[in-house]
Structures are given as structure tokens and as C-alpha cells.
Amino acid sequence: MASTTTTQLFLTLSLLSLLAYSAHAQLSTNFYANTCPNLPTIVRNGMRQAVNRERRLGASILRLFFHDCFVNGCDASILLDDTATFTGEKNAAPNRNSARGFEVIDSIKSQVEASCNATVSCADILALAARDGVVLLGGPTWNVPLGRRDARTASQSGANSQIPGPSENLSSLISKFAAKGLSARDMTVLSGAHTIGQAQCRTFRNRIYNDTNIDANFAATRRANCPATGGDANLAPLDIQTPARFDNNYYGNLVARRGLLHSDQELFNGGSQDSLVRSYSTDGTSFARDFSAAMVRMGNISPLTGTNGEIRLNCRRVN
Ligand code: HEM
Ligand SMILES: *[C@@H]1O[C@H](CO)[C@@H](O)[C@H](O)[C@H]1NC(C)=O
Ligand SMILES: *[C@@H]1O[C@H](CO)[C@@H](O)[C@H](O)[C@H]1NC(C)=O
Ligand SMILES: *[C@@H]1O[C@H](CO)[C@@H](O)[C@H](O)[C@H]1NC(C)=O
């Protein structure tokens, strides 16, 4: 009797955990294993070509994925072009004259369509391409859960209000990530993406002229190509040491008060993230491991699955 009850309890618990598991397992790493087996190779080759042409494209694609996931989830909403009757996210403040790399996704998408048409979402292509860009620039790899579908809508106002900006303070950065189900640790480790890529003068001018928590030589160096007025689009590397290599130098820069963005330096300014920043600055292995895990969590933000959304044929417009 007791053992029957125990067995029943065990079976019930197993069933419950199975249900709980499947509720979270909408995405899976082998989603296209039968329907598009060459997908990983096509995306990797497309990204290799792009990065060989311009290493910064690895960074630009990683940022596109972040900006996609933070607005209505990872649903390729950022890839939709504006039209006379449709306002997308490309002209939202964080993206306008800033988000780049769309042609890389177009080119990969057309090769994916040639190999397995109407099967793979633009959202999944972006998730794989972001991972591959990191790998090609020397960073860690991870398995990308797949099965996202593409949105038929976008939100310019969502992009304006939900993507964090370079002048924000620590508590505001933490709360914007919390709004997406990501922790302060996730925020700090994902910011390590600023180990690659470039920023425009307009995004760090106020920091290099007005902030006091900045290394004086670093500020002088950056001012040389970012005047107090004008030169808004002039570029500077987010990581002054190795801008085209995905490593943990970003955190060493922060400890040396050489964060380029005000928001970067907020992670090491006497607050709650200081100890984690210090630890990543000396432990590239734990940064790589935590970054990979956090990328999977970011990639899980409210995907469209099942029969929701669609498989776009052209990433720039709804079917
Ligand atoms: C924590 C809050 C964040 C803020 C405030 C922020 C802000 C910015 C800004 C202002 C730029 C420069 C854009 C320009 O000048 O055109 C930038 C670039 C970039 N961001 Fe972030 N970012 C944040 C988090 C992230 C995350 C989570 C990722 C990815 C996981 C990311 C990846 C990148 C990359 C790779 C670039 C360089 C892009 C390129 O060179 O084209 N950022 N970010
Ligand atoms: C996919 O390819 C098949 C065979 O070439 C074609 O008949 C079909 O119209 C294509 N589907 C879409 C949605 O493009
Ligand atoms: C951080 O920024 C928010 C929004 O701009 C502001 O309300 C808050 O007072 C700031 N917090 C600190 C600690 O400066
Ligand atoms: C420095 O801060 C002052 C006061 O907020 C502001 O008026 C000025 O434009 C800032 N300077 C730069 C170069 O951003």
C-alpha cells in the first residue's frame, strides 16, 4: 500500500516535471535537423564571409540579436523595413543610423531559402549568426536552441523605451534587463559583448568630457577624435585593447576606468557589480562560460512558436 502510493506519487511527479519541461522546451537545438540539415553550415559560412570582409560585422550582428530580443522577444522584428503603411524598429532611437549588418542576414537568408525554402525563420538565422560571429572573433561557442518563428509586427515605441541607452545608470540598466527576465549578473556578463565593435562619438561624448570616473589619458585619447561639438558619427572601439577579438579585456578596461560608454563604467563604479567585473577581468574562462549561458537565456525571451507568427520568406517584410 505504502509502496503503491509511493509509486503513484513518483509517477505523478515524473509526469508533472515532464510537463514543466515541455513548457520550457519550445525551442530545441535539433529543431531543423531533418528539415534543414545544412542550416548551421550555411549560416557559419555566411558569417565567415562577412567577418573576413569586415571583422566589425560580427559585432554588428551580435548587437542586432540583442536589439531584436529586447523588443517583443526574439522574433526578427528588428529586421522589418519601414514602408508607407508600416512602422518598424529600424528608425527607433537606439537603431537609427546605428544598427547595421542587415545585408549579411539577407544574404544568409537567401542561401537558406535556396537549400530549404519556407522552413527556417529569420529569428533563428539571427540567433545562429550572432553565435557564429562571436566564435569567429575568438569567443566561446554554445548550442543555440531553435524553433522561433517570425513576427508579423514590430514596435518602434518598444524599441525606444525598452532597449537600454548609453547614459543610463546602474539601477536603470538592471531594471531594463529584469523586465526581460534577466538578472543583474546576466546584464553584467552580456555587457561583455562590448569587447568587440565600435561606438559613435555622440554615444560617449558626454562621458569623455563630463564624467569624473574616467582615466584621464583615456579621456584625452578619445577626445582627439570626438570633439565637443561635431563629429557625431566618429567611431571609437568599445574595447580599447582588442576591439576585433572577443575576450575579457572589456572588464579590465572597466577596472582601469576606461569604459567607453557611461553605461559601461556604471558596472564598475562602487556598486553591486564591481566584484563580478573584477572577477571577469582576471578569469576569462568563467566569463566565456557565463556569457554563453546568458546568451541562451537572452535568446529564450518570449519566442513565437508553434503556429504563432510565420516563417518569413524575406526577412525585411512580412509574407
Ligand atoms: C547594458 C546595456 C547596453 C547599452 C546601454 C548598450 C549601448 C550600446 C551603444 C550606445 C553602442 C554603440 C552604438 C553606436 O554608436 O552606433 C553599442 C554597441 C554595441 N553593443 Fe551594446 N549596449 C548594451 C548592451 C549590449 C548587449 C547585451 C549586447 C549583446 C549581447 C551588446 C552588443 C553590442 C555590440 C557588439 C556593439 C558594437 C556594434 C557594432 O560595432 O556595430 N550591447 N551598445
Ligand atoms: C518552395 O519551392 C517549391 C519547389 O521549388 C515551390 O513550388 C514553392 O512555391 C516554394 N515555396 C515558397 C513558399 O516559396
Ligand atoms: C537612475 O536613473 C533613473 C532614471 O533616469 C533615475 O530615476 C534614478 O534616480 C537614477 N538613480 C540613481 C541612483 O542615480
Ligand atoms: C557637459 O555637461 C553639461 C551640463 O550637463 C552640458 O551642458 C554639456 O553639454 C556637456 N558637455 C558635453 C561635451 O557633452
Image: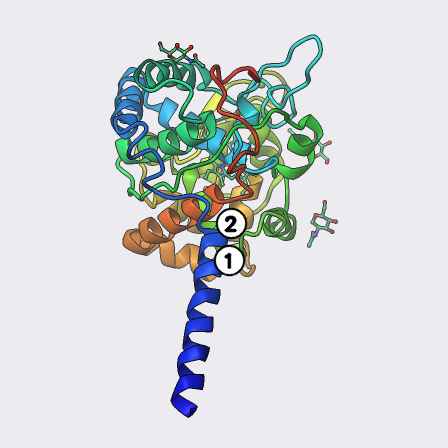
Image point (68%, 26%), residue name = 156
Q: Amino acid at mark 2?
A: Met
Whole-percent x, y for residue 70 in the image: 57, 38
Q: Evaluate if marks 2 and 1 touch, with contact meaning CB atoms under 8 Å apart.
A: yes
Whole-percent x, y for residue 117 in the image: 38, 17
Disc ID at residue 301: none
Image point (61%, 39%), residue name = 164
Mark 2 surroundings within 10 Å by alpha-carbon count, few (fewer than 14), some (14 through 19), many (20 or more): many
Q: Secondary structure at mark 2?
A: helix
Q: Is residue 140 above or below residue 244?
A: below
Residue 132 shows up from this direction? yes
The CB of the residue at mark 1 lies under 8 Å from ligand 1: no
Q: Amino acid at mark 1?
A: Gln
Q: Is residue 309 above or below residue 23?
A: above
Mark 1 surroundings within 10 Å by alpha-carbon count, few (fewer than 14), some (14 through 19), many (20 or more): some
Whole-percent x, y for residue 40 in the image: 28, 30
Image point (32%, 18%), residue name = 50
Reading the image, the residue beneath label 2 is 187
Disc ID at residue 273: 1
